[in-house]
Image (spheres, rainbow, N blue to C red):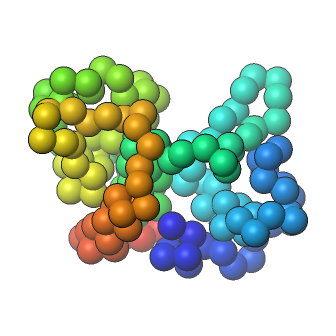
């Protein structure tokens, strides 16, 4: 995502996530898109990213909506969640963003009427999602 949306330039020297250190190959990439990531911000502790963990479908949907410049005002019809038996499993704080991603065709559910928000995505799915985001008729934020 950082490379596709040219977000690795002029990265701040200040480390954001406790588990993403400047000596890591992915540091500039993660820092470059940090404003579009969900991350983990525990109360009273330094934020962490979990770079070794899998990217979850709901997190990717959120990130794509944010990086393409869409916001919560774009969600037209919350009935979109009725298509998925597991829509209640989507994190409440980002559910609207996931709905926008579904409405705009950035991400889709599965044939069994499931969205699987907490399922890790494969590399192939990541490529498809990035391709859709690039082709989406939206304005990429600066």
The correct choice, above or below, for 15 with respect to 41 in the image is below
The correct choice, above or below, for 4 with respect to 40 in the image is below
Tell me where residue 90 appears, x and y as whole percent.
37, 28
The correct choice, above or below, for 83 with respect to 20 in the image is above
The correct choice, above or below, for 42 with respect to 54 in the image is above
Q: Is residue 138 visible?
A: no
Tally of marks: 0
Tell me where residue 26 appears, x and y as whole percent.
71, 65
In front of the other: 39 or 125: 125
* Left or right side of 101 for 2: right
Tell me where residue 1 appears, x and y as whole percent.
51, 67
Residue drawn at x 61%, y 61% as measured from the top left: 33
Tell me where residue 58 appears, x and y as whole percent.
40, 40
* Left or right side of 99 for 69: right
Residue drawn at x 32%, y 34% as measured from the top left: 116
Give the quarter of the image for residue 137.
Answer: bottom left
* Left or right side of 92 for 17: right
Q: Is residue 136 visible?
A: yes
Give the quarter of the image for residue 34.
Answer: bottom right
Residue drawn at x 39%, y 44% as measured from the top left: 57
Residue drawn at x 40%, y 37% as measured from the top left: 119
């Amino acid at each position: 995502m950082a490379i596709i949306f040219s977000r690795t330039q002029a990265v701040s020297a200040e480390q954001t996530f406790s588990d993403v250190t400047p000596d890591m190959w992915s540091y500039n990439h993660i820092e470059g898109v940090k404003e579009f990531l969900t991350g983990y911000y525990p109360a009273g502790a330094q934020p962490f990213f979990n770079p070794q963990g899998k990217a979850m479908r709901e997190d990717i949907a959120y990130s794509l909506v944010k990086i393409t410049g869409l916001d919560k005002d774009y969600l037209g019809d919350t009935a979109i969640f009725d298509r998925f038996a597991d829509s209640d499993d989507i994190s409440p704080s980002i559910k609207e963003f996931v709905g926008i991603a579904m409405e705009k065709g950035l991400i889709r559910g599965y044939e069994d009427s499931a969205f699987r928000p907490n399922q890790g995505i494969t590399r192939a799915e990541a490529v498809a999602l990035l391709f859709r985001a690039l082709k989406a008729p939206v304005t990429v934020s600066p």
